[in-house]
Structures are given as C-alpha cells and as structure tokens.
Image (cartoon, grey):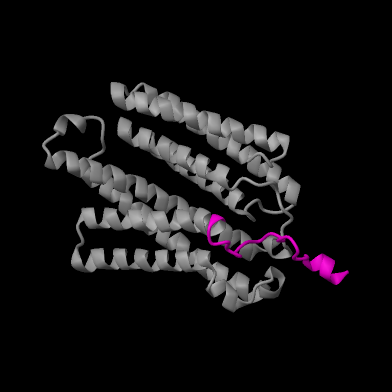
Amino acid sequence: MLELVPLEKLLFLGILFLSVISSILAYVQIVKEDVRFRHSLVAFALLQITLAVVLLIFRSHAIQAFPMTGVFESMLVLMVLIGITFLFLSAFIQQIWFSSVMVWVLSVLALLSALVAKPAAAPQEAARTPWAVAHALSMSLAGAMIIFAGAMSILFLWSRRCLKKNQFVKLFGTMPTLEKLQALNLLGLRLGFVAMTFGLVSGIGLVAISSQELGLPPADWLTDSKIVLVAVSWTLLLCILLLRRVFAFSGKAVAQATLVICFLILFAFIGSEKFCKSGHGLINQPGRPSSSSQAL
C-alpha cells in the first residue's frame, strides 16, 4: 500500500478509515440492538464504494485500459459489487445482523486489498479486448455473489445454532428468518455459478486468441494455481446445486459447502498471488516485454 502514488494512497486510506468506523458502528449496533445505526452504515458503505470507484477511474486513466488488469483492481471491483448488493438489499432487509455482517464483509475485503495494493502497471494489449473485459467483469461478479452467499451462510448457521439452543431472544427482530437466509444463499450461489461459467468460457476464448500476447501457452494457463482454484470452485458449485435438487441437501450442508467455496475464491484472488505466485494476469510482468516493444 505504501507504494501507491499519493492520490491513490489518500483515496485508499479513506476507504480503510471508513471501513474501521463502519465496523465499529456495526458492532455497537449489535450490542445495543439499535436499528437506527443502519442508516449510518448505509451512508458509510456508499462513501466507501464511491472512493473505490474514483480510485478505479484514476487507475483506468493511468493505464489507458479497463481497470481490472491486476489483483488490486479486482479486489476494488469486488468491494464495489458487494457494496452495491448491500445498498440494494438494505431497502428490503432491515434487520441489524444483516447490515452489520455486510459491513464487516466490506471491511475484510478492504483489508485484503491492502495486502495486494500496488501501483498501476502497464497492461498487455490483450487487456484491451472485449474478451478480457467480459472475463474480468464476470469473474468479479461471480466472486462477489459467492462472497455474499458466504455471508448469508454465516448468518444461517448462527441462526440455526441459536434456535437449537432455544435462544430466540438473540434472533427476534434482529436476524432475517432461516428461510430468507437460505433463499439469499441459494440466490448468491446461482448467480455466482452463471457468472463464473461465463467467466470460464470467456477466459478460454481469451487464451485461445491471445495466448502469445499473454506470454503463457495454454498448458501453463491450465496448471496455473488461480485457474485450478476457480475450476475446483466451479465444480463444487455445480455439485452443490445439482445435489441439492436431486438429494434435497439440508440448508446446513449447503451453507457449509458455500463457506468452502468462498474460501477457495478468496484464496484464488489473494492467496494465488501472494503465496503461489500465479502467472495469471493481464499486465506486463517485469522482464516480459509488451507486444509493442517486441515489434520494435
């Protein structure tokens, strides 16, 4: 994060500051069981995603391309999509646990973004193609929907645990019903599956037409850690949706499996970059010339 240019650093520090303040308010809201904090949380979330959008616009101007060529930009887009989902659903779901958990999810994404924050890098020519834009947007949407489903799974499992212990007071008026949480979880999984399927198809198209420009042969892409994690997540997601329909999996089993997929997706975004040194990306890596320099 310290490597960011001054203006980008200021904007991102603003995002982190809003995340800390909103997380504290979310905790206070739970402790005091006061729904009036919800309006403040919505306002802070709106400011947070606005700063993220402004930062993405600056990135877009700096690289002269769609701002999703690196992990940092992808994390910012995830924050924006989760924030928009929260703002939309907050008009219909007013229980304090829902808004608090969604705010905490935004805060976690902000902290994870700090781990991969880097200055803007020159994109490869492939990043300017419609295939790249479609792939990046669909995969980010898939990630956002699965993370949202993961948040609803946490609420579902917590509510179920409280009900089994006859702790109705903890849930009354503060938590959406189990049926609503299960429906939101399944909605996130279904939307995530559709978006991820399109992302995989568009990614295959991107590799097929731009493998030489991207500097990686198809065989290397297929064994890349990020690609493998996404493929495993897609397979698990397909199995969950099919098995739930055929064998009527319980809400608990679906929620637990959702958390596993959510972890895999987050690790695909962050862990594959930090620990596995994934070569998946649309930026010119150090020592790897761009097509224009190759032409010269």
Look at the image and tell me in which quarter the C terminus lies: bottom right
- Where residue 54 sits, quadrant-wise, is top right
Q: Is residue 163 left or right of residue 293?
A: left
| Magenta-drawn stretch contains 290 | yes
> Which residue is drawn at the image coordinates 23% and 57% (left, top)?
253
88 and 201: which one is in front?
A: 201
> Which residue is drawn at the image coordinates 34% and 25% (left, top)?
29
Asked if residue 182 is positioned above or below residue 132 in the image, the reply reads above
Query: Residue 166: where, in percent of width, then height?
Result: 11, 36
Q: Is residue 291 left or right of residue 26?
A: right
- Where residue 193 sits, quadrant-wise, is bottom left
Whether residue 52 is visible to the viewer of this picture, yes or no, is yes
276 and 146: which one is in front?
A: 276
- Where residue 256 sits, quadrant-wise, is bottom left
| Magenta-drawn stretch contains 141 | no
Q: Is residue 99 left or right of residue 111?
A: left
